[in-house]
Image: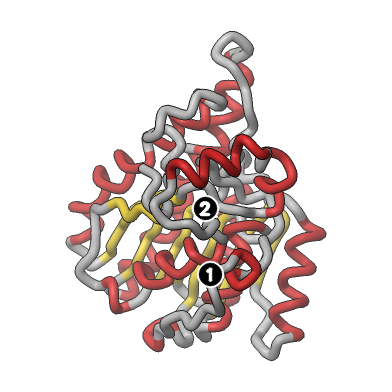
């Protein structure tokens, strides 16, 4: 069960036998500013497209400039304003916070922040050095905290806000292929719950969304083996494969006024695996 921001969108739900989607619409997102980390491809791109379709003013960062430009062009070609975006390595906290500030200058104070960026590269306990450890935490753990730090002043000015932190079910199912990733993702609930009370006083909500095994192009090309197909059939309660848009829909709900009384919680979208 893994999540990555550095992968292309998967085919539609219809291609996986789920039937055509008829998703809910969230009018409260119309005109609101939203920021997504790791928004250029994969799950992040699905979120950016969904927010844009809802009429939100969207900004995002991603290390993949080519995929980000393609996404922005596709949204604009579809009749929506092109999202604000910048190529950014989130390991550079100053660059991340500067991007958020510049995006806010263009789009306004952010009503919603989605901390999506992550990298689930495989590794073993024995192979981890202190340098590798620091690198993994600099991608999978640290950016969320400092992105929150950057958007909260604007949310206080708005008198409300919604923060969604992307967790993972991989560590909950005891997956052993990425211990550093598991450690970082297990800390997401601590971040969510540790800030919920202080932010809640300003009507800023903060929640975790934990995806199961989402069929991004990266996941399919790298790890969806016949054994993986067997794992899905054996462990999921629902037969259809999880898609990036399945995660995006939960995130939109939590970012919208429909989720106005949801905070300090973890919402799992994994087809019943965990």
Question: Relative to the observer, which residue lies in front, 229 or 12?
Answer: 229
Query: Above or below — where is 256 with respect to 242?
Result: below
At a point 70% along the width and 53% down the height, the residue shown is 217
Residue 177 visible from this viewpoint: yes
Residue 207 figure quarter: bottom left
Quick one: which residue is furthest to the right in this view?
66
Residue labelled with disc 2: 116
Question: Relative to the observer, which residue lies in front, 136 or 231?
Answer: 231
Residue labelled with disc 1: 18
Residue 93 figure quarter: top right
Q: How many marks?
A: 2
- Which quarter of the rendered picture does the C terminus lie within? top left
Query: Above or below — where is 225 with respect to 196?
Result: above
- Asked whether, in this view, residue 93 is left or right of residue 253, the answer is right
In x, y percent, where is residue 8?
Answer: 71, 57
Q: Check the image and tell me how it is coloured.
A: secondary structure
Q: Secondary structure at mark 2?
A: loop
Q: Earlier in the sequence, mark 1 or mark 2?
A: 1
Q: Secondary structure at mark 1?
A: loop
- Asked whether, in this view, residue 206 is left or right of residue 154, the answer is left
Residue 99 visible from this viewpoint: no
**Separation of marks 1 and 2 at Cα, in angstroms:** 25 Å
In x, y percent, where is residue 239?
Answer: 48, 57
Classify 10 Å Cα crowding around label 1: few (below 14), some (14-19), many (20 and above): few
- Asked whether, in this view, residue 74 is left or right of residue 199, the answer is right
At a point 62% along the width and 22% down the height, the residue shown is 123
In x, y percent, where is residue 211?
Answer: 45, 51
In x, y percent, where is residue 24?
Answer: 42, 82
Quick one: which residue is furthest to the top in this view?
126
Classify 10 Å Cα crowding around label 2: few (below 14), some (14-19), many (20 and above): many
């Amino acid at each position: 069960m893994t999540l990555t921001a550095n992968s292309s969108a998967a085919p539609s739900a219809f291609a996986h036998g789920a039937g055509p989607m008829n998703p809910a619409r969230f009018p409260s997102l119309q005109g609101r500013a939203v920021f997504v980390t790791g928004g250029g491809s994969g799950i992040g791109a699905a979120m950016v497209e969904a927010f844009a379709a809802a009429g939100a003013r969207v900004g995002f960062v991603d290390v993949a400039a080519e995929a980000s430009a393609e996404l922005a062009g596709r949204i604009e070609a579809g009749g929506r304003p092109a999202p604000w975006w910048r190529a950014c390595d989130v390991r550079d906290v100053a660059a991340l916070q500067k991007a958020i500030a510049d995006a806010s200058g263009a789009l306004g104070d952010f009503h919603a922040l989605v901390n999506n960026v992550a990298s689930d590269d495989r590794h073993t306990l024995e192979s981890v050095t202190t340098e590798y450890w620091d690198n993994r935490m600099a991608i999978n753990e640290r950016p969320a905290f400092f992105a929150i730090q950057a958007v909260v002043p604007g949310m206080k000015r708005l008198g409300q806000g919604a923060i969604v932190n992307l967790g993972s079910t991989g560590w909950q199912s005891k997956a052993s292929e990425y211990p550093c990733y598991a450690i970082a993702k297990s800390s997401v609930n601590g971040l969510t719950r540790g800030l919920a009370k202080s932010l809640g006083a300003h009507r800023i909500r903060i929640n975790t969304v934990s995806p199961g095994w989402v069929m991004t192009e990266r996941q399919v090309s790298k790890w969806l083996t016949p054994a993986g197909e067997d794992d899905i059939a054996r462990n999921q309660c629902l037969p259809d494969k999880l898609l990036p848009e399945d995660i995006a829909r939960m995130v939109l709900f939590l970012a919208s006024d429909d989720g106005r009384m949801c905070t300090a919680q973890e919402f799992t979208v994994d087809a019943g695996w965990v």
